[in-house]
Amino acid sequence: MKIQYENLTLRQAGLPDVKQLAAWWNDGTVMAHAGFPNGVGVTEEEVAKGLGNGCMVIEENDRLIGECSYRNIADGIAEIGIKICETDCQNRGIGRKILSMLIGWLFRNGYSKIVLDTNLTNTRAQHVYESLGFQKVRTNIDSGKDQLGRLQSFVDYELIEKNFINYI
């Protein structure tokens, strides 16, 4: 899979991307929102073994700036995730465009519902998801702990095609 829009590319992650993916996943500042303030502690070899359908990288002007993923969780339902990992690329509307690219592709390829969750404290992400038409399904208070043992709360979202607001 490879989707391009303006200067953005969303493509399948490959072996040349492993070093950068491992660096991001082991960086606590990148992974704190996902409950890993110390990073996930994964080797490049483990990242390479985990590459496959659904693991994608985000490029802006041929520079790797983030990653996203999707996985089939039920018939016609995909769960997605996204991280704009390079701080100079955050708060510029890139996430909304990348999500529009990915969600549009998923709906065109047989999915009828997209789901995701985000940390309750990640209000920036919640704003982006809601601007795309995602509906809040539930808030799960103190439903998990981060790797430091701190309780975390999450918001579950879902999107059906008729509610999708496409930004590309």
Image (spheres, rainbow, N blue to C red):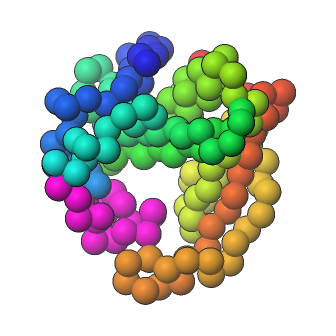
Q: Position of residue 52 (x, y in %)?
A: 36, 34
Residue 30, quarter of the rendered image: bottom left
Rendered-image quadrant of the N terminus: top left
Question: Which residue is rendered at x = 34% and y = 71% of the image?
Answer: 37
Question: Which residue is rendered at x = 79% and y = 57% of the image?
Answer: 137
**Can see residue 23?**
no
Residue at the limit of the structure toward the right, as seen here: 162
Question: Which residue is rendered at x = 77% and y = 63% of the image?
Answer: 138
Residue 4, quarter of the rendered image: top left
**Can see residue 35?**
yes
Residue at the limit of the structure toward the bottom, as seen here: 149
Number of callouts: 0
10 in relation to 67, above or below: above
Q: Which residue is at the front of the view, 106 or 3?
A: 106
Q: Position of residue 148 (x, y in %)?
A: 37, 83
The region drawn magenta spans 26-44
Residue 17, quarter of the rendered image: top left
Rendered-image quadrant of the C terminus: top right
Left or right? Give the position of 104 relative to 92: right
Residue 43 on the magenta segment? yes
Left or right? Give the position of 101 relative to 166: left
52 in relation to 88, above or below: above
